[in-house]
Image (cartoon, helix red, strand yellow):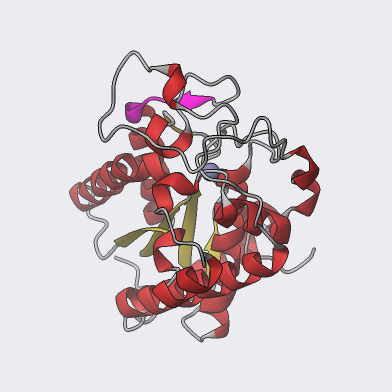
Amino acid sequence: MKDSVFMEEMDAFSYRDKLAKGAVAFVPVGALEQHGSHMAMCVDAALTRDMAGATAEAVDAAGLGPAVVTAPINFGYRSQQRSGGGFHLSGTTSLSGSTIISLAKDICYNLIEDGVRKIVIMNGHYENYQFVFEGAQLALEQAHARGLGGAKIQLLSYWDFVDDDTIAALYPDGFTGWDLEHAGVMETSLMLLFHPDLVDMDRIDEDLYVGLPATMPNYDVLPIVADYTPPSGCLSHPGASTREKGIVLRDAAVAGMLGAIEREFGGLGDFHEN
Ligand SMILES: [Zn+2]
């Protein structure tokens, strides 16, 4: 069996060995969502799993202890029109908020029950954040009520660790913000790096990819007014994406996340049974 940070590719005995050494456990949270005509719909789940894997390897290499990555949550909270084009678009297959809360809570609690005390929930779909936050807190409350103390959960979205200098270098014409990055240069460049077989830049049809970056109202409205979403479903233009930009984005985000994880978990030492 190959050596892997991914739980799905690990036997249970190797997993338990890592936990006994105080492993950091990553929980990637993604979505199944339309990303225009040029990318597969797995983007948020696939990239978050990849970024968690790269960060887990960095944690191990930095001597912070072993790290494992759980299976991702492959579906996400309802895509919002202003950050994902909207949940009305066919292909986007969403969960309700209560389902995401329950998934995050159950996964975190199971990890704690098995001995994990350092959990990093890595988000890759803008809309998930508050629901996984709620699930994390409920998991800690349940663990506390059942006498399982000492667990800590860190929550982050990987793009928040791309520093300003990197943003300035990658977006010379100006940066429109992470909310409008849906299917734009960041996600497309990272997909060209991690999953080139799931991207087709020739499918960026200039007649379809119009009205980008999207100009959205500064409020939400229900039922959704479909015309507010650009026809491609993307919110910014992916044309300037390259694999090289993907490398820069990955390295900047992983370095930033490693620093944050070190800050929260660096001094905890090995896991002790309660
Ligand atoms: Zn996305």
Is residue 24 left or right of 37 when viewed as pictured?
Answer: left
Residue appearing at x 46%, y 36% in the figure:
84
Q: Residue furthest bottom?
A: 63
Q: How many marks?
A: 0
Asked if 84 appears above or below 52 in the picture, the reply is above
Does 96 appear in magenta?
Answer: yes
Residue appearing at x 39%, y 61% in the figure:
119
Residue appearing at x 53%, y 21% in the figure:
89
Q: Is residue 115 visible?
A: no
Is residue 139 left or right of 2 when viewed as pictured?
Answer: left
- In the picture, residue 164 is in which quadrant? bottom left
Is residue 241 left or right of 67 when viewed as pictured?
Answer: right
Q: Is residue 88 visible?
A: yes
Q: What segment carries the magenta color?
A: 93-98
Q: Foreground: 188 or 168?
A: 168
Q: Residue furthest top?
A: 223
Q: Quadrant of the N terminus?
A: bottom right
Residue appearing at x 41%, y 28% in the figure:
78
Q: Foreground: 161 or 167?
A: 167
Q: Position of residue 168 (x, y in %)?
A: 46, 71
Asked if 133 appears above or below 222 in the picture, the reply is below
Q: Foreground: 62 or 241?
A: 241
Q: Position of residue 257 (x, y in %)?
A: 43, 71
Q: Quadrant of the C terminus?
A: bottom left
Is residue 160 left or right of 88 when viewed as pictured?
Answer: left
Q: Position of residue 163 (x, y in %)?
A: 42, 73
Does 62 appear in magenta?
Answer: no
Q: Position of residue 157 (x, y in %)?
A: 41, 56
